[in-house]
Image: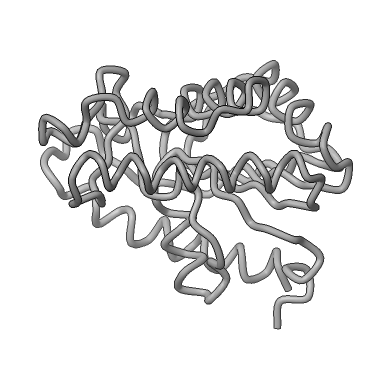
Amino acid sequence: MFNNYMKFDNIIPLGDHCAAAFILKDLGLRKKAYPFDWTNHAGGIMKTSIHKNIFLLRRLLRYGNPKKCSEFYIGNAIEYGNHKTNHGIQFPHELENAQITNEKYKRRFDRLYNDIICGFKNLYIIITRKGDVDQDFVNDLEHLLVFHNSESKILFISGNENTIATSTDNFIFKYIKYDYLEEIHGNKWYQYDEFFHKDIKNYLIEFLQ
């Protein structure tokens, strides 16, 4: 069914929330766990953790210390029970204690590091509801990841109609409408996630066939 999926060694979600992991799992394509699978920005859907995730990824690839990256990323999130670090990253799916969570994320950062520097042909997926990036960010990201394998691809899916990013051979930008009304508060925006995820899932099925 997924002929294009077979062309990649790994599919690696890079944020900014858990949509990619959920959808890949639903499609039976989630084979490994990575550190950015189940995290998001604590500031809500108008904020994004993409920049912080990529900053940490750059640090990981430069220094190769998964343990320190895990400790920095999680911070005091689990220890104080607020599931939020002092740099705005939230861990809503983590229910275990700080030691177990840190060990788990250390393994995930270690796996991420090895799956990139070993030169595997990877498909990196970024999904954001309303987060924004500029072309310089895209260019830097492409250089960072494609450096290790020129056939790797970055799929950037955004619900932000104001994001303008140029697709290249290695970077694919896809706008998928996210119908969010700012005056709606509480958890009602999860209703929009249902439609957003469905549209993304349909697009991924087409993309990977």
Q: How far from the left and from the top, in percent, is residue 36?
A: 46, 42
Q: How far from the left and from the top, in percent, is residue 208?
A: 70, 67
- At 59% from the left edge and 21% from the top edge, which residue is drawn? 59
In-image side of 40 versus 153 (left or right): left
**Nearer the observer, 17 or 207:** 17
Q: Residue most toward the bottom?
A: 1
| Quadrant of res 97 | top left
Give above or below for 81 relative to 157.
above
Classify the position of the C terminus by image quarter: bottom right
Q: How far from the left and from the top, in percent, is residue 28?
A: 53, 76
Colour treatment of the image: one colour
**Nearer the observer, 20 or 200:** 20
Tally of marks: 0
Give above or below for 5 relative to 183.
below
Classify the position of the N terminus by image quarter: bottom right
In-image side of 9 versus 24 (left or right): right
In-image side of 181 versus 51 (left or right): left
Give above or below for 175 relative to 81.
below
- At 70% from the left edge and 64% from the top edge, which residue is drawn? 207
**Nearer the observer, 7 or 103:** 103
| Quadrant of res 166 | top right
In-image side of 78 versus 118 (left or right): left
- At 41% from the left edge and 43% from the top edge, which residue is drawn? 105
**Nearer the observer, 111 or 150:** 111
- At 61% from the left edge and 63% from the top edge, which residue is drawn? 204
Give above or below for 24 relative to 142.
below
